[in-house]
Image (spheres, rainbow, N blue to C red):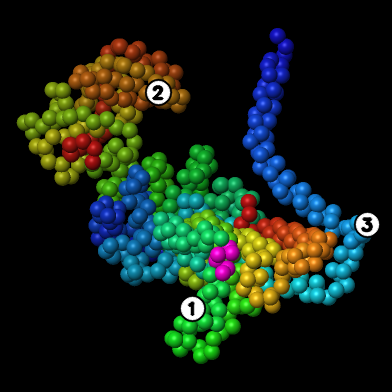
Amino acid sequence: MSDRPNAAGLRRDALRERLGLFGLGLPALVLVLVTMILPVGWLFWLSFLADDGSLSLVHYQRLVEQPSYGRIFRATFEISAIATAICVVLGYPLAYVLAQLPLRAANLCMIGVLMPFWTSILVRTYAWLVLLQRQGLVNTWGIKLGLWEQPLALVHNLNGTLIGMVHIMLPFLILPVYGSMRAIDRDYLKAAANLGASPTRAFWLVFLPLSLPGLFAGALIVFILCLGFYVTPAVLGGGKVIMVANRIANDIEIFFNWGAASALGVVLLVLTMIVLYVASRLTQLGRVFGGHGT
Amino acid sequence: MVRGASLPIVVRQVTKTYGTVHALDHVDLDIHSGEFLTLLGPSGSGKTTLLMVLAGFTRPDHGSLKFGDTEVIRLAPHKRDVGMVFQNYALFPHMDVAANVAFPLRLRGVPKAEAARRVEQALEMVQLAGYGGRRVDQLSGGQRQRVALARAIVFEPRILLMDEPLSALDKQLREHMQIELRRLHEKLGMTTVYVTHDQREALTMSDRVAVINRGRIMQLDAPRRLYERPANRFVAEFIGESTFLPVEYRDGAYAYAGRRLNLASGSVPDGTPPSGRCLLMLRPERLRILDREPTDPMNVLRGVVRHVVYQGDSFLLQVELGDASMVGLRGVSTSDAMAGIPAPGGAVLLGLSPQDTILLADEGGRA
């Protein structure tokens, strides 16, 4: 008998277990590879090819030289930022209310919040078009009730785009914020009250800081998803709101310029990754200064 | 920090029901100024509910609560000015130790320099001087406990509430903290209400203990009296180990198994009807093994040894009496004592002095 009995057999068992786990993940891994990595890699490659098929930076050169591209990127970031801000202002209080409700009632309300997820974005966007147009439901009723006199320009512009985007994005903000609020131990608020904090001060000094990680995560998700919006600005923007995704579509559909479209896509991807990186650095800093992270 | 003012607490008729369950059932309780009073009871007894009523987190159905002469039953928690140590400490995770302790001072508008001085003083008091810059998650359980305590006393409240503050600590640290809490109480002198389900902790720390069951106070007494003269079967069973033997009352005297019991003053609690059925309460450590029939007025039980359990510092003898009831006897495990224990199956004579002979009214099963 050796001095390490069964060592080889035990090692084999461990290996078999790991292989089994890998096997479970394999189908999804292959799917991601085929539908994500390969096409993106192909586009990446295309963006470095000139029209005659030679390697060149001509597409990126155009992005830098033509000011219209810079404007589109700036508009994309601005619209995303405004939509995110509106989501925060609307979503945080709602999440707060939900977090105060008994769990059962909160779950029921949460179904309401998640309802939009169950219909397609396209359907919802066209529904807004119907509601918001000059003779739409909102304008007719607003005038009827005497809230305003002339039909408001609620659609085919930035207003409509923002309304549609916020509507679609709100659940993405509410979910993580609600989650982080539910995770806050009620005893913290009791302790704050016991130590002399009125409900308002307890909110600002204890509850809000503890819910910030969730708010930050939610806002980040919303902002990044907004950067890639296509349908909503296309339908509700009336051609006046052009975000990067719309420009990419134009380049392909109208100009058949795959190289230019690819370059736009690559730049958007890189910018998004930079946003993510900066955000993750910021949260780590937040932890150093006593954030909620453990 | 010096010995400050303290306030008495007067609880009258406080009742809280959840559905049909009485969490608190017309509770009356007077807590003296500067006293260390423990609410002791099993889980669900209402002890925590009562503490939460004192803190203002639970709104009772009716009743009166006074701190000193001031009625506070409708006062919001943040206006009550009582310190509280929570079971899980509830230290704010987004603040460091100093900010946590300074929190109540900040809310009271204490100037920064003075607040810093008082924070350091409070941390010193709980032996955590110099820990101000630490993050809460860098602290051990015992240290968190101390920070929570410092935060609860830094604004010099006249009443301090503690909700099972030591339950999360291991045994050794818990015993150490019990002594330290007691020392701190003697130093600061604030009226302290302490909740625990640990009877030993209650007996160790308190001036008086209120034993609570089903929303009622079963007995309110000093630790020794509570242990040696329990008012009823519930208290006798909840605090310490005990067995009960049925006692007959005949011709003006109590008897067990035909033998007349020798009693001392206080053996029969007030209000126990002499004619009713009674129980003899036996604590294992109050029994002793006798060599022969005693000449002094000692009560004697005859039985047969069934088990001998060695428990390190003590031994436990399980003895079956003539009527088949089992009683336990505990003794210190000195070599002499161990040598004198009869083997299982052997006859044994148990002695109980009249001072330790306690009779209780038989309320018919567990209270």
Q: Position of residue A43 (x, y in %)?
A: 80, 55
Where A170 sits versus B234, above or below? below
Write the residue at 69% across / 22% down.
A12
Counting from the top left corner in percent of width and height, residue B40 is at 35, 47
Q: Residues within 10 Å of mark 1 (few under 14, many from 20)?
A: few
Helix, strand or loop for disc 1: helix
Instruction: Tell me which residue sits at (50%, 88%) in the image.
Output: A148
Furthest-bottom residue in this view: A149
Q: In the rendering, which numbered label is found on residue B333?
A: none
Q: Nearer the viewer, residue A87 or B325?
A: A87
Measured in 3D between alpha carbons, the distance from the residue under mark 2 to the one under mark 1, in whole angstroms, is 86 Å
Place of residue A237 in the rendered image (x, y in percent of width and height, measured from the top left)? 65, 75
Residue located 33% across and 33% down the image? B241
The N terminus of chain B - image quarter: bottom right
Residue located beneath label 2 in the image: B315
Residue denoted by label 1: A137
Q: Compare residues B277 and A47 and report the one nearer the observer.
A: A47
Distance from Cα at disc 2 to Cα at disc 3: 94 Å
Eye-nearest disc, 2 or 3: 3
Looking at numbered disc 2 in the image, what kind of residue is underneath it?
Phe
Amino acid marked by disc 3: Ser
Magenta region: A121-126
- Label 2 residue SS: strand
Chain for mark 2?
Answer: B
Side of B148 relative to B309 (left or right): right
The image shows residue B145 at horizontal and vertical percentages of 53, 51
Task: Please name which of the two marks, 2 or 1, marks the residue nearer to the observer.
Answer: 1
Q: Would you name the residue on which mark 3 appears? A: A54
**Callout 2 crowding tier (Cα within 10 Å): few <14, some 14–19, many ≥20:** many
Indicate left or right for A170 with B286 as reference: right
Determine whether label 2 and label 3 are within 8 Å by CB: no
Q: Quadrant of the C terminus of chain B?
A: top left
